[in-house]
Image (spheres, rainbow, N blue to C red):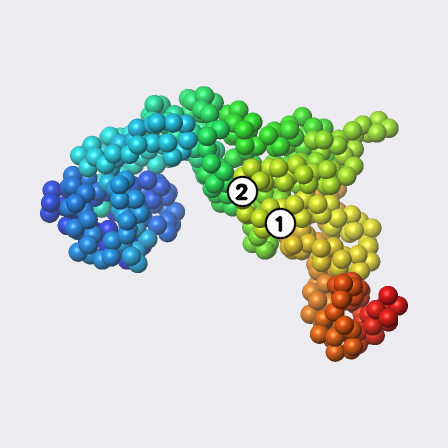
Amino acid sequence: MICVYATNAEMARKIAEKVCKLGGRTFFVGGYVRDAIQGRSSKDIDIEVHGITPRDLCEILDSLGKRIEIGESFGIFGLKGYSLDIAMPRKEKNRGHGHRDFEVFVDPFIGTEGASRRRDFTVNAMMQDVLTGEIIDHFGGKSDLEKGIIRHVDEETFAEDPLRVLRCAQFAARFEFEIAPETISLCRTMNLSALSKERIMGEMEKALLKAHKPSIFFETLREMNALDIWFPELKALIGVEQNPKHHAEGDVWVHTMMVLDVATEYIPYVGNPLGFMLSVVCHDFGKAVCTKIVNGEIHAYKHEDEGIPIAERFMRRITNEKDLIRYVLNMTEHHMRPNVLAADNSAIKSTNKLFDMSVDPKGLICIAIADGLGKIAPREYVSYNDFFRKRYEIFEEYMSRPFVTGKDLIDAGITPNEKFSDYLSYAHKLRLAGVEKESALKQTLAYARKK
């Protein structure tokens, strides 16, 4: 019997026992069964109830707790206090090209094979009887799981939902599985244009944050010819050459994929994990438009600046979250600076100013490190980690000191006016330079009188 979380498992069993008394069966389904067979923990449990009417199921759930209608017309329910999705088998009829363009019909008597056929991949189509532990595997999911293969269940039903192209790439990245050739061929025929940005982001976020090698997600989409509609800025990096003195790995696409995989190691240290990984995706977009040969050498001068509008276009295509967009654009703009300042052993004031401009100084340092490691360089890699650590500690120490505030200026006799923000900005510059508050206040007041 597959192990489950106690409270959710107990409730699943109580439901199954009541369903059984009415002549039905209850199964664990989907990714939960797949993960459990692999020995992976799963926070949520999905069960599917067969052989009783929706009315009977509602009465059972009402007798066990507060029923939550997740999608009553779709036969999907929950119980308050439990991470348990309770569904009835259903049929779906496609009436468009989008992920939501389906008519759904609950059919409690469709049978296990019919219910499994509507699922995306064989590894997700296995079922397990909650009471007996029997594994129902109509489509060879266990064999594919053991071999590490992602294979679609049914060509007709799979092709009705274009989001499955992204799910295929996401699973390949998370589990590092091979994709069956026939599934790749089928995905190449599917149109992604009607999908919503929220769905695209949802699958990409899982690949970026849950995969050890998120590059597999994008490499898979490339193999499926699925970059054009949602990821044209990434596709534009293919074939963009780099100076072999610094990048012997190949074009900008290869470099970006390498940096992505390195960057996963730094996710625990950054302030915004999703923003950080999206910043890695975007960091060299500018190279597609400003790479040139100068005096016989390949250069991409100012690519960090040229990449800002390109990154913004990409981000607005996939999300409406303003803070996330702002984070990525800020990181894209400054991603080169840490390594440049470290190479020049720049003054503390310069690194303080950079960290102050950054929405996530630790994230900026991490992207700079990943950018340096995500390449094949002819010469030995020079680590600036000690420089970054010491300078960030100094920055944090400076920021922890007392500093000049607006109230300080008002108490000293400065009347708030249109120049007041200029005075505060001047005081902040002194703070970044390490000037103690008393001296900074005197200098700021002198600056204000001069103005």
Q: 10 Å neighbourhood of mark 2: few (<14), some, or many (≥20)? A: some
Q: Residue at 37% of width from left, 46% of height from top?
A: 39
Residue 60 visible in rendering: yes
Q: Residue at 67% of width from left, 26% of height from top?
A: 239
The amino acid on which the numbered mark 2 sits, given as a three-letter code, is Thr
Nearer mark to the viewer, of 2 and 1: 2
The answer to which image quadrant residue 289 occupies is top right
Instruction: Give the answer, above or below, for where 278 lies relative to 291.
Output: below
Contact between marks 2 and 1 (CB within 8 A): the answer is no
Query: Residue beneath label 1, please?
Result: 327
Q: Secondary structure at mark 1?
A: helix
Of the pair 347 and 411, the residue shown nearer to us: 411
The amino acid on which the numbered mark 1 sits, given as a three-letter code, is Tyr
Left or right, 277 with reference to 160: right
Left or right, 156 with reference to 405: left
The answer to which image quadrant residue 35 occupies is top left
Left or right, 449 with reference to 202: right
Instruction: Give the answer, above or below, for where 76 lies relative to 103.
Output: below
Instruction: Give x and y (percent) for residue 367.
Output: 66, 47
Instruction: Give x and y (percent) for residue 264.
Output: 57, 46
Instruction: Give x and y (percent) for residue 119.
Output: 33, 33
Query: Residue beneath label 2, please?
Result: 319
Circle nearer the N terminus (2, 1): 2
Instruction: Give x and y (percent) for residue 58.
Output: 19, 48
